[in-house]
Image (spheres, grey):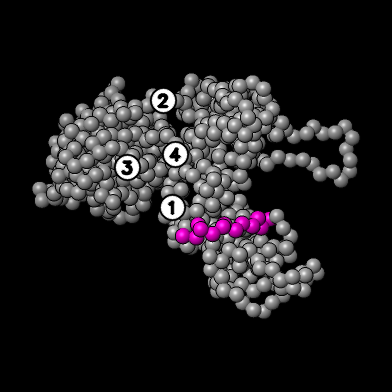
């Protein structure tokens, strides 16, 4: 029997072996691209006949793993048709993440999974199929990226993604032919609905991605081609985020140029306030605000306390046709239920004790403008019912009155609660939740925006120094490390207050780690128990999530230092799943710095 195992050569890297195999497999021959552990290779398929996949030494394609059956699956090749069936294996055979039963006909670029081994079926197009090289659907490309992410966290291998955009891409056949000619057989391409071409480059870092992009640009730069490139893990660990960031990089590139993901910040001016935006998630949120603001539908803003929900509401109003009128705001948690009702809906003279004159409520005052309801999750059930009626009928009835008054008001609501959970528990009306959440915007907490934190800290410190009439201060590197490691339960508000404090309290011109650590430590400290316990005194607690987060930051940093920056081994020291470790390290800004190639 012909030896077709395709096992990788000793000492060869997956890229080397893939390139070598690519020379051995002719362009018109079907093959499987095999990813097994830290290795990859091309396995050629015969023109006809069967290919048995399994653990047995007699298998045509051998996968040496205990979870793989001796004869696990069989490929049947009959002319142009290639099909696969499971041979009664214990752990099953999957095609595009669906366990197969019976025989399954394979399509080009189908992904076969047998335990931890991935096999991508490649079949060259017929002469009449148009451009050379087959393309994937975007959904299949996302799955390929997910597979690459799994390999990245298992073996710390890089991969890159290109996005090609511009007028020259309008001729898809010619553009795709020129692009595919510059690619390896392990690479993959897919067209998006907006006419951009995405190129997945397994086992390629930023420098290799730039080299491929340069070759493509030389062939295609006839109509303002823009190429963006991102690399995992430097630019993210999520398939959707990497696709979006590659697109953003291409959009930010000049015609005829190649651009990596930029880390620059933009300043958004909202009335008299300025907002620094550097995090891609927040940048997309403010771009969405620009689209939602003119529409007039209710918006629900979610996020932790102090994350800037009020600024989002202000931005929605400022960019809307209602901006000429004043934004009306109410903190629903700041007033008693009876006072909230009077404040919102107004009251007639004599409606209750102290109501000596008739008074319009905030809903009436906001007619023609925007009403911002902060902490809307704190509204009592009776108030929720009345607010729902206003949203449905555009009419409001004052307390103590039977007349209805027409109002034209847009409602923007905000909460730090999980309203979906409150709905499920019966604490918040389901119908009101759906009314308020016609559009939902979520603000990530400050600890998840490590790019913005240094910029915000410096801006807040400059503002505080200017307000106090003193010379500008500088934040030292060690102080910045302390700031980045802090969990920021109070988010932006807590950071602004800290900078205002140090600008007023410190005499020097440099903010050092001990200054920050002393202040933050004092804020976090739990008072020691008193020698004399007073019966009935409640114990003092900190949020458990904050303590867990601080412990994670400390242990992850220690593990990374102990392993010299090897995240896989660091995850092993903590007995933490590798992908979870990667995500948490990036979340806390602890990912070891790697060489980047920005062009």
In the displayed structure image, the side of residue 317 where residue 116 appears, left or right: left
Judge depth for marks 2 and 3 and give the one in front: 3
- Which residue is under mark 3? 251
Q: Residue sitting at 40 percent across and 29 percent down?
A: 156
C-alpha distance separating marks 3 and 1: 18 Å
C-alpha distance separating marks 3 and 4: 15 Å
**Image quadrant containing the N terminus:** top left
- Which residue is under mark 1? 290
Of the residues under marks 3 and 1, which one precedes in the sequence?
3
- Which residue is under mark 2? 594
Of the residues under marks 3 and 4, which one precedes in the sequence?
3
> Where is residue 166 drawn, in percent x and y?
24, 44
- Which residue is under mark 4? 266
Provide the residue span drawn in magenta. Answer: 321-333
Q: Are marks 4 and 1 in contact (CB under 8 Å)?
A: no
Q: Secondary structure at mark 2?
A: loop
Residue 149 part of the magenta segment: no
Of the residues under marks 4 and 1, which one precedes in the sequence?
4
For the question of whether residue 288 can be seen, the reply is: yes
Q: Secondary structure at mark 1?
A: helix
Q: Nearer the viewer, residue 29 or 557?
A: 557
Q: Residue sitting at 77 percent across and 40 percent down?
A: 540
C-alpha distance separating marks 2 and 4: 25 Å
């Amino acid at each position: 029997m012909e030896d077709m195992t395709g096992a990788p050569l000793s000492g060869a890297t997956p890229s080397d072996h893939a390139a070598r195999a690519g020379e051995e497999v002719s362009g018109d021959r079907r093959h499987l691209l095999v990813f097994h552990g830290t290795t990859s290779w091309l396995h050629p398929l015969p023109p006809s006949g069967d290919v048995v996949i399994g653990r047995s030494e007699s298998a045509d394609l051998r996968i040496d793993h205990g979870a793989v059956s001796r004869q696990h699956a069989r490929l049947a090749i009959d002319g142009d048709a290639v099909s696969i069936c499971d041979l009664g294996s214990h752990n099953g055979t999957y095609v595009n993440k669906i366990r197969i039963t019976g025989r399954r006909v394979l399509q080009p670029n189908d992904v076969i999974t047998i335990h931890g081994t991935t096999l991508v079926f490649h079949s060259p197009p017929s002469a009449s199929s148009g451009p050379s090289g087959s393309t994937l659907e975007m959904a299949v490309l996302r799955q390929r990226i997910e597979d690459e992410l799994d390999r990245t966290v298992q073996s710390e291998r890089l991969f890159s993604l290109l996005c090609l955009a511009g007028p020259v891409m309008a001729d898809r056949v010619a553009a795709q032919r020129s692009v595919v000619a510059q690619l390896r057989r392990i690479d993959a391409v897919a067209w998006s609905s907006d006419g951009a071409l995405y190129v997945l480059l397994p086992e390629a870092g930023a420098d290799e991605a730039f080299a491929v992009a340069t070759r493509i640009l030389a062939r295609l730069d006839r109509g303002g081609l823009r190429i963006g490139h991102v690399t995992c893990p430097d630019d993210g660990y999520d398939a959707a985020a990497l696709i979006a960031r590659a697109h953003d990089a291409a959009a930010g590139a000049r015609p005829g140029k190649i651009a990596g993901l930029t880390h620059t910040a933009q300043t958004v001016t909202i009335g008299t306030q300025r907002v620094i935006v550097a995090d891609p998630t927040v940048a997309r949120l403010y771009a969405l605000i620009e689209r939602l603001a003119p529409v007039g539908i209710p918006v629900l803003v979610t996020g932790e306390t102090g994350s800037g929900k009020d600024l989002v509401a202000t931005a929605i109003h400022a960019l809307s046709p209602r901006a000429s009128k004043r934004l009306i705001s109410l903190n629903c948690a700041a007033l008693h239920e009876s006072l909230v009702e009077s404040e919102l809906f107004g009251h007639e003279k004599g409606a209750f004790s102290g109501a000596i004159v008739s008074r319009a409520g905030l809903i009436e005052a906001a007619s023609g403008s925007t009403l911002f309801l902060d902490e809307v999750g704190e509204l009592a059930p009776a108030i929720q019912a009345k607010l729902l009626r206003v949203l449905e009928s555009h009419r409001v009835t004052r307390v103590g009155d039977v007349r209805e008054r027409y109002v034209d008001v847009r409602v923007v609501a905000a909460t730090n609660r999980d309203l979906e959970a409150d709905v499920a528990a019966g604490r918040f009306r389901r119908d009101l939740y759906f009314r308020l959440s016609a559009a939902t915007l979520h603000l990530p907490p400050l600890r998840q925006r490590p790019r913005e934190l240094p910029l915000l800290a410096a801006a807040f410190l400059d503002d505080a120094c200017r307000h106090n009439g003193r010379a500008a201060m500088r934040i030292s590197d060690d102080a910045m490390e302390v700031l980045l490691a802090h969990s920021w339960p109070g988010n932006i508000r807590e950071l602004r207050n800290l900078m205002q404090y140090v600008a007023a309290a410190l005499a020097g011109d440099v903010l050092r780690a001990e200054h920050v650590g002393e202040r933050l430590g004092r804020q976090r400290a739990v008072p020691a128990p008193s020698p004399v316990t007073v019966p009935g005194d409640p114990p003092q607690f900190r949020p458990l999530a904050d303590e867990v987060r601080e412990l994670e930051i400390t242990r992850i940093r220690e593990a990374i230092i102990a392993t010299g920056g090897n995240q896989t081994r660091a995850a092993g020291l903590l007995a933490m799943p590798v992908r979870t470790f990667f995500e948490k390290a990036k979340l806390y800004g602890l990912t070891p710095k790697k060489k980047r190639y920005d062009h």
